[in-house]
Amino acid sequence: MAFVKAQRKQAFLKLALTGPSGSGKSLSALFIARGLVGPTGRIAGIDTENGSLSLYSDRVDFDVTEIEPPFTVAKYTAAIDEAAKARFDVLVIDSLTHAWAGEGGLLDKKEALDSGGRGNGYTNWAKITKEHELLKSKILQANLHVIVTMRSKQDYALVDEKGKQVPKKIGMAPIQRDGMEYEFTTVFDMDMSHNAMTSKDRSGIFDGAVFVPTQETGEALARWLEGQPAGVAAAKQARRRSSPSKASQAEGSQVAPAGKPFDMNFLRTPENYVPRFGKFDGKRLGDRNPGEIQHYLDWLKAEYEKTKKMTPECAEFVRVAMAYVAKHPPKQQEPEDDIPDFEPQEGNV
């Protein structure tokens, strides 16, 4: 037995992203993964959300496998082993919540043991704990970077917006066994504005920062793992990204350039977004009726449920429009006449 000089480059990153549904965990995880392994690194994804991870395949290049119910620990561990065997550089697990609280997950298994009269509550928890420890060990000891998403329990808080108290969805503890999030190297807690903060950060890069995760986030973590100084510069970048610059505020409306990666700033100021397709083509969202936008969103979602297809332009519009109506909700008593009649153009979905 011999001791060797400890080096961060010998370690694999284990990162968790927590947040309510719609906070941007999936795409953020993919962006971070790409920055972490570079433009040629191989990314694997485990999708438990009915193929939703693949909706972002136009943003980030990756391979995917889907896990369907029952969400057993055995399915997760087999997928992790396969990713390591295939020599992927990073694995994104979206989401780890299903292994705990999904159909056929560990909580379901505990309930089945109890109702079946097999053992008692204490001994049955021991069996569940053994499986959970196996899953945790498989993630932490995997010979590749692992990024997991975990859905947070949701609650609503009253926040002040333009002098009015309005309810806003917030995330609380992740839906996972208590303390699971603290097993990771770094934990990003995301909100409905797609901002992230750290509840744990061994890198020290993001302490006190509020930021939108991007590929630069992964690049900073990669530099840290390699022993390069990433802390001060990366933290400053994160803080700069947390609020629009004076230059960007002066620019006014933002048009998404064709063929360019999605600009997460659109989610911060959705009223300035100008879609590139359909009925809203060339028209700033902030100049439209929120009820009209919600009406169009409902139609697009219904069409997607039927076809399971969506163009990149449409997917981009849906993401930003959802952020807009969350920020500017339609009036509860808004009359139907306030929503202009129109037929969504063919080819949008």
Image: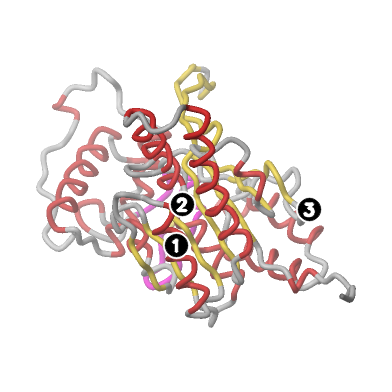
- Whether tag 2 and tag 1 are in contact, CB under 8 A, the answer is yes
Residue bearing mark 1:
262
Q: Amino acid at mark 2?
A: Phe
**How far across and how far down the image is residue 344, in percent?**
14, 51
Whole-angstrom CA distance, mark 2 to mark 1, is 8 Å
Circle 3: is it few (<14), some (14-19), or many (20+) Cα within 10 Å? some
**How far across and how far down the image is residue 237, in percent?**
71, 57
In the image, residue 257 lies in the stretch drawn in magenta? yes
Q: Provide the secondary structure element on which disc 1 rests.
A: loop
Whole-angstrom CA distance, mark 3 to mark 1, is 27 Å
Q: State which region is magenta.
A: 255-274
Instruction: Name the residue located 52 percent from the left edge and 74 percent from the top edge.
Output: 84
Q: Provide the secondary structure element on which disc 3 rests.
A: loop
Q: Nearer the viewer, residue 345 or 238?
A: 238
Residue bearing mark 3:
204
Instruction: Name the residue located 74 percent from the left edge and 68 percent from the top edge.
Output: 225
Q: Amino acid at mark 3?
A: Gly
Q: Is residue 274 above or below residue 150?
A: below
User: Nearer the viewer's eye, disc 3 or disc 1?
Assistant: 3
